[in-house]
Amino acid sequence: MSILANRDTRVVIIGGVAGLNAARRMAQFDFLVNRPLTVQAFVYPPEEGQQKEIYRGGELKNVPVYSSLEEALAENPGINTALIYIGANRAYTAAKEALEASSIKLVSMITEGVPEKDAKRLRKLAHAHGKLFNGPSSIGIMSAGECRLGVIGGEFKNLKLCNLYRSGSFGVITKSGGLSNEAMWLCAQNGNGVTTAVAIGGDAYPGTDFVTYLEMFENDPETKAVVIVGEVGGTLEEEAAEWLAAKPRRIRLIATIGGTCQEVLPQGMKFGHAGAKEGKKGLGSARSKMNALREAGALVPETFGGLSKCIKQVYEELLADGSIQPEPEIDEALLPELPPKVQEVMKQGEVIVEPLIRTTISDDRGEEPRYVGYAASELCEKGYGIEDVVSLLWNKKLPTREESEIIKRIIMISADHGPAVSGAFGAIIGACAGIDMPQAVSAGMTMIGPRFGGAVTNAGKYFKYGVKEFPNDIPGFLAWMKQNVGPVPGIGHRVKSLKNPDKRVKYLVDYVKNHTSLHTPCLDYALEVEKITTSKKDNLILNVDGTMGCILVDLDFPEQSLNGFFVLARTIGMIGHWIDQNSQSAKLIRLYDYLINYAVKEEREVPEKK
Amino acid sequence: MAKILEGPAMKLFNKWGIPVPNYVVIMDPNRLEQLGEANKWLRESKLVVKAHEAIGGRFKLGLVKLGLNLEEAVAASREMIGREIGTAVIRQVIVAEMLDHDEEYYVCINGNRDGAEVLLSNKGGIDIEDNWDSVRRLFIPIDENPSIERLTEFANEAGFSGEIAERVGKIVSRLVLCFDNEDAQSIEINPLVIRKSDMRFAALDAVMNLDYDARFRHADWDFKPVSEIGRPFTEAEQQIMEIDGRIKGSVKFVEVPGGEIALLTAGGGASVFYSDAVVARGGTIANYAEYSGDPPDWAVEALTETICSLPNIKHIIVGGAIANFTDVKATFSGIINGLRESKSKGLLENVKIWVRRGGPNENQGLAAIRKLYDEGFDIHVYDRSMPMTDIVDLALNS
């Protein structure tokens, strides 16, 4: 048995993220004691219509968010309890609405910093409606084995350590939230655990008091003793003492009171909760409370540390007089375990998960990214450049200084080729249409293909094939190409010819052959091919795609990476064009009619649809 | 609880039609001379000058000067402003009209759980404690403000009669309005005086406590509450308050000069029990501290460094109950960093550190702080199986 919350308790949480966290903790308890989800609805207008994901053990549940309490209650008629998690400036209105709803019997408020006047009015309202208003600043209510309201009890492991999966014989009432958990632990360690623990909050005027709950515990046959953790300030502890002394009580009372240190503190200094303030002439002092409780017959240790012994003593007396039976030992191994997250189990090596992807080039799980094992900052420190990073990520090798210089030049000379070509033009049209950089650059990028810039890979691939299969037989290679592929990729140019050579090609070939020691079988082969093809037609020269492809093959880059150099280089140019158009505030463009041949049907009537 | 100074209290009285004497609050004595040129009452009335600071026992410290003319008031404020009292410096004085009066009354409202209680006596002034039997009480349930008729009757019960009773009833009714609307926790006016020649009333001295948690609905609360610890805050205390103001959760710190046992404790409830345990075992606390509500690690680190800098401490109690949701691993990482930083500055020599804590990620947190032993800290770490405040006993017996 229990007070305040039991297996029939169904909850609406009013508030945002703190409420969601509480609901998740509550669901862990639901799982432990094998009950359905306690939280049935959230009320939080900014997130109206959303579903909040909550795990009850391994089961994923969705809890709806409503914009009004009325709606939440209409759709979830079982709700009888409201938890207030909303900010102090809205807490009063939320709690008032809940107290006025006929189906809600208990409202508990965790919100801190609620004005005293608001708390007083809520207390009065609760009285008028015959309901309970617990809090403000209450960590929650825990009925062992039955129901958890709020985050009281902490993490899952602690719920088990405090025996909260089953009912004991001790009630707990505290002002402090942290000490409610401590007191539950003490009752489990020195006794047989708790029936219900309730935190009333440390504010000056809590909505409930010790006596309200003592009366309830007195009427709960399973509760044999109650532990109260009180504090200096107010008169709630004195009232508890009066209650105890008023007539013979069934339950035993153990009490500890914080704030005796105020006796020696400098005048006027106060610590702790808002309510922890001594009145004039020692009224509400910790000492006067301790004395009152002792006189009334409660067991009151001198310090909190002495609480363990008191609980143990009462437990043993209750066992001795037969009020309670010793609890059978519970095999903790039989208690459910929260299903662990995949990552946790993998760490322990108990499960194998097949990876979805595999990477061989880069890893950012440490302090900084590593490219094929090398820390990015160390590469910078040791004088490596962007061309070395390209080589690492595309070819997993650090190039020599000579090789880097070649890669750098390839990128530099292909970075842009004016606004007229397909890629740049596409990006410019995009920029003029007002779209953002990534989209405009992608528009240009989509142009890269067999007719524009996309020949590097195939050029490299086939010249490499020629070197291997037709080493000294260029006519044989050309015949094979004609039969199996078509025109040789990397050969031919729309405007350039032998007489009007492509300066980029000349420069690259000259640089590689005369200023580096790179071994260039593929480039040499392509130049031999060019001799034959130009003899047939003047413009069948080795073009820039072909030259790049061959040099990159000679640099040992994998075939499928070769187009990447054009893509990378042109990205620089296309970004430039986008920035250029935007900085000029270029307007939307469209083709003039005279640039279009309208080879269309004459105007005609649309026939009726058949 | 937030006590406010007389100046802001007078302003609120004015707002609610409670009679106050003319007054000005100044920081610069020259300004008072110029105010004198602008205000007839400053030139023609007897004046009182009081230090406008949160300092108890002002009268004995010579920080209240009575019966002055303007020239003397300027001299008195010149003398007071800039004076150092302990760690406090007088920066403001309040200069008020000293009303010649015939009688002194006492009126007070204190909040309680069900509403408020009005206390009224026709024998006010400095002897009110001796005349406590004359005080009459009226309970006012929350949201049920009494009628003027009822309050006049109440004034009659307290020994007032005729027109004076009516006027007192009216003042009390305005005081109730002020109390209710301004989220006050207590207002004490002593004395409320009357000059019978022109039936003029004035609240000559007032102590007012406001509920600072309600500031979100008071646009005109342009003042800060004064320190709640009986003295102005120290620089270190203000730094921690400043951090407290901008984090989730909270960190709190109050210095208690001369103590040997420093507290680095968690939770508003447990921290007080740790202070109690030190006192109960005959020790002296060097401070009160509290972190709660899962504050960020850097805030706990700042609190730790502040505590490590306390002079002449012999022990640090890193204590706490079994937390509900404050992450022990995360908050302890702040404490560990703070302890390391302090040690590297040469602090913590011959200081013993005692740890007891439970809560989310307790095993990782305790294991991490235990490692400080290998770094040369004199540290003793216990888990939840150690009764909460028993580390204080261990510290004091070591």
Image (cartoon, coloured by chain):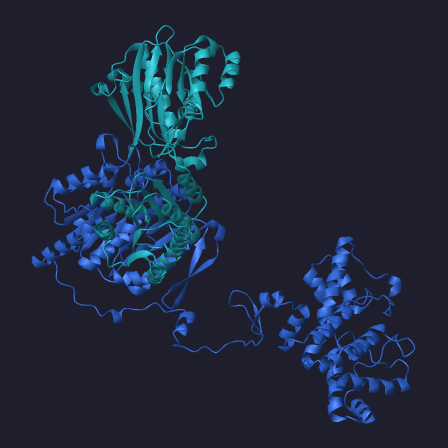
Chain colours: A blue, B cyan
Residue A301 drawn above or below residue B210: below
Please name whichever residue, A425 or A363, is drawn nearer the observer in this view of the structure: A363
Instruction: Point out the residue furthest to the left here.
Output: A321
Position of the N terminus of chain A, as image quadrant, is bottom left
Q: Residue A291 appears at what percent x and percent y?
A: 15, 39
Q: Can I make out residue A110 in this image?
A: no
Please name whichever residue, B370 or B142, is drawn nearer the observer in this view of the structure: B370
Instruction: Point out the residue furthest to the right here.
Output: A499
Q: Residue B388 appears at what percent x and percent y?
A: 25, 53
Please name whichever residue, B305 or A182, is drawn nearer the observer in this view of the structure: B305
Residue A380 occupies which quadrant of the picture? bottom right
Residue A450 drawn above or below residue A33: below
Q: Which residue does the image show at 56% across and 67% down from the upper left?
A: A369
Instruction: Point out the residue furthest to the top here.
Output: B197
Q: Residue A339 appears at what percent x and percent y?
A: 36, 69
Please name whichever residue, B111 or B300, is drawn nearer the observer in this view of the structure: B300
Residue A572 occupies which quadrant of the picture? bottom right
Residue A528 occupies which quadrant of the picture? bottom right
How many badges with numbers are in the image? 0
Position of the C terminus of chain A, as image quadrant, is bottom right
Q: Residue A75 appears at what percent x and percent y?
A: 40, 55
In the picture provided, is A466 more to the left or to the right than A69?
Answer: right
Q: Can I make out residue B281 in this image?
A: yes
In the picture provided, is A48 more to the left or to the right than B116?
Answer: right
